Image (spheres, grey):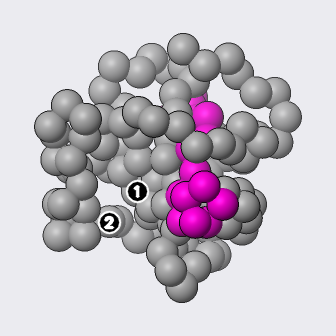
Amino acid sequence: MCQRAERNEIKLNRPTFQVPSDYTRHMVSVTGRTADGDYKRPDGVAVDEIFWMKVQADINSSSLLLYDKTRTCTFTMLPEDVGFNELLEKVRAEKGAMGQKCHVEALFDKEGDCRVYPSTATLRKW
């Protein structure tokens, strides 16, 4: 389990754009599950429990794909979304992934809102 980062918390808005299933169909988790997630708390994660979320940028920096290890939480952020620029900056800073992805700590609170912690950005293996 991760420890909660107290600084630089960003409360993400519910996405206005839902990830098309054909866009994520090729994503398979380490457990063999295909991506069929949504903006929701991942399976097996409690309310206010910290988990790792992968943030992936497209080549044009026009969207971010965020998902957890199980892919039950999978959603897209657009440039107008709160936190987009901060997360994109962290993704582009990860030279080990050629500036295409990073992992950040996240949680879903009791209201069902996702909070991310950009200051925890790193590269991880699931």
Amino acid type at circle 2 is Val
Dot 2 or dot 1: first in sequence order is 2
Residue at horizontal 62 percent and vertical 76 percent from the top = 79
Mark 2, residue position: 19
- Which segment is the magenta one? 95-113
Is residue 108 shown left or right of residue 26?
right
- Label 2 element class: loop
Where is residue 105? Give x, y as percent: 61, 34
Q: Measured along the vertical axis of the image, is residue 28 above or below residue 16? A: above
Q: Is residue 104 visible?
A: yes
Residue at horizontal 78 percent and vertical 42 percent from the top = 119
Toward the viewer: 97 or 91? 97
Q: Say which mark, if any, is on residue 75.
A: 1
The residue most toward the front is 96
Q: Is residue 72 magenta?
A: no
Where is residue 87? Give x, y as percent: 67, 58
Residue at horizontal 36 percent and vertical 36 percent from the top = 69
Where is residue 77? Give x, y as percent: 52, 65
Amino acid type at circle 1 is Phe
Q: Are marks 2 and 1 in contact (CB under 8 Å)?
A: yes
Residue at horizontal 60 percent and vertical 55 percent from the top = 96
